[in-house]
């Protein structure tokens, strides 16, 4: 993922705020390139969920990740910059 900072890598990104809770924010990356990001604190921390078919699928990853597992990553936002 060396190009993950490149906007062409991510493609279209959709963002939505939950009507019942303004601190809950969702960002959906094009389905074939990423997954669903979810924040419960207005965007300071994010949880990225990647379904097994977009991750390692039925192969898994050796002894580290079993087959057919959904991957969850926790991300802390530390800096925001405008694109050039």
Image (cartoon, rainbow, N blue to C red):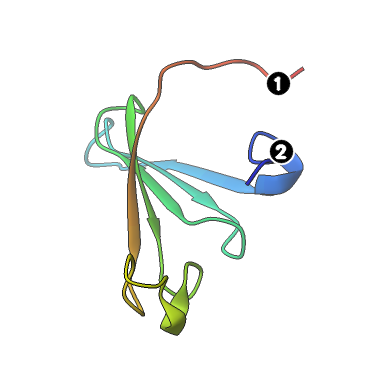
The C terminus is located in which quarter?
top right
Identify the residue shown where x is 28% and y is 38%: 24
Identify the residue shown where x is 65% and y is 34%: 5
Q: Earlier in the sequence, mark 1 or mark 2?
A: 2
Please, is residue 67 above or below residue 34 in the view? below
Q: Tags 1 and 2 in contact by the CB under 8 Å rule?
A: yes
10 Å neighbourhood of mark 1: few (<14), some, or many (≥20)? few
Secondary structure category for the residue under label 2: helix
Please, is residue 21 above or below residue 68 in the view? above
Q: Which mark is residue 83?
A: 1
In the rendered image, residue 72, in percent from the top left (x then y), is placed at: 32, 54
In the rendered image, residue 79, in percent from the top left (x then y), is placed at: 48, 15
Q: CA distance from mark 1 to mark 2?
A: 9 Å
Q: Which mark is residue 7?
A: 2
Residue 69 location, quadrant: bottom left
Looking at the image, residue 57 sits to the left or right of residue 10; the answer is left
């Amino acid at each position: 993922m060396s190009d993950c900072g490149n906007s062409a890598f991510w493609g279209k990104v959709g963002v939505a705020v939950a009507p019942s809770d303004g601190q809950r924010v969702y960002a959906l990356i094009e389905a074939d390139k990423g997954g669903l990001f979810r924040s419960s604190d207005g965007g300071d921390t994010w949880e990225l969920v990647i379904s097994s078919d977009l991750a390692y699928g039925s192969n898994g990853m050796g002894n580290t990740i079993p087959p057919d597992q959904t991957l969850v990553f926790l991300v802390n936002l530390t800096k925001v910059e405008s694109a050039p």
